[in-house]
Image (cartoon, rainbow, N blue to C red):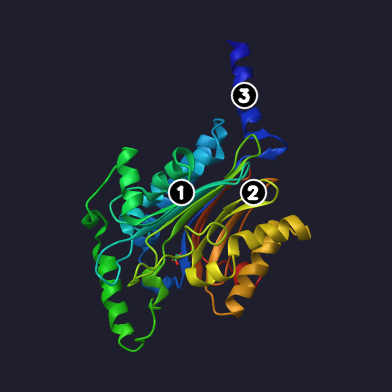
Amino acid sequence: MKKLLLAIPFCLSASVMAAGAPVGIVIHGGAGTIDRSKMTEEQRQDYEATLTKAVNQGYELLAAGGSSLDAVTLAVTVLEDSPLFNAGKGAVYTWDENHELDAAIMTGQDRNAGAVASVTNVKNPILLARAVMEKSDHVMLTGIGAEQFAAAQQLELVDNSYFNTEFRYEALKKAKQARQKLPQQATVEVDPGWKMGTVGAVAIDNTGNLAAATSTGGMTAKRWGRVGDVPVIGAGNFADNSSCAVSGTGHGEYFIRYNVASDICARVKYQGKTAATAANEVITELLQVGGTGGVIVVDNKGELSWAFNTQGMYRAKRNYAGTVVEIFATETEKAGN
Ligand code: ASP
């Protein structure tokens, strides 16, 4: 009996620490104008509870020896199933009052990746992205073809109305009003507080493998088959064991043009920068060209970090040092440190 008691802590510490790196996970639920005065105490608690649930489930899986791929899949699935975030259940509306969802997943040990764009009836697009990576010869599937593949993989399908929420419908109405003034634009910049909520997770497991997963409904009032940064590998989602894993959220067009996720990892790999420094640089430079948003990062030593150029980002992280759950920018972050 005594032996067993001694063995348990050893097993736990062996699984939490391996390959010289502690296991860890970071998640986000979108970045943007998060107005403290407009958020009720109850709303804040709801957001924090869901972020906590997602980060804990991901971490517990890692601590039990699970893979970073399974941990990011699980955390993103939890966030997709919540109506609070712009992914899965809470996806924003298109101009035509439907929902078109994008997602991507990537593993750092082999740079394997799967992505889906503009799917309308898959309950958890992140599971479809993973199926594309693991069960097809392709990296990205779109629209009807992606949905046929989802059916063939026996993933859970739902009617598009499953994604309807009152809150996001109000956002669409506001976006349509704003659009009257901007007839040339394919997407509309409404108050980002109404459109944010893309979700993502990055993790490192006890073999030192990195993984990243991101899922989104895209931008409110998008039209003409607009696809954002999330399924574009290297833009909104990226993982490479030689550097880091990144998941982004923000104005997707900028993330695509500036290859945000892979640029952060390239600075770590080729310039020897820490992931936190590289993320801060890229997100600061992005704002200089007009791109708002943020990223979460885990590097191949297990350092967890985030950076954003907005008022806040729904975010949480957990490793051996404990759990942090935040929504608004802290004083240190506001000061640019
Ligand atoms: N990046 C997402 C997109 O452009 C939106 C978001 O993160 O809020 O599709």
Mark 3 beta carbon near ligand 1 (under 8 Å): no
Disc 3 to disc 2: CB gap under 8 Å: no
Q: Which residue is mark 2?
A: 240
Figure quadrant of the C terminus: bottom right
Q: Position of residue 164 (x, y in %)?
A: 24, 60
Residue 265 visible somewhere in the drawing: yes
Which residue is at the front of the view, 259 or 291?
A: 259
Q: Quadrant of ligand 1?
A: bottom left
* Residue 261 sits above or below residue 63 on the image: below
Q: Which mark is residue 154?
A: none
Q: Position of residue 212 (x, y in %)?
A: 54, 49
Circle 3 packing at 10 Å, graded few (<14), some (14-19), many (20+), is some
Q: Which mark is in front, 3 or 2?
A: 2
Residue 81 visible somewhere in the drawing: no
In the displayed orientation, state which residue is furthest to the bottom: 181
Figure quadrant of the N terminus: top right
Mark 2 beta carbon near ligand 1 (under 8 Å): no
Q: CA distance from mark 3 to mark 2?
A: 28 Å
Q: Which residue is mark 3?
A: 11
Which one is earlier in the sequence, the residue at label 3 or at label 1? 3
Which one is earlier in the sequence, the residue at label 3 or at label 2? 3
Query: Residue 106 vs residue 76: left or right?
Result: right
Q: Position of residue 172 (x, y in %)?
A: 29, 73
Three-letter amino acid code at the position of disc 2: Asp
Circle 1 packing at 10 Å, graded few (<14), some (14-19), many (20+), is many
Q: Which mark is residue 52?
A: 1
Q: Position of residue 56 (x, y in %)?
A: 48, 42
**Badge 2 element:** loop
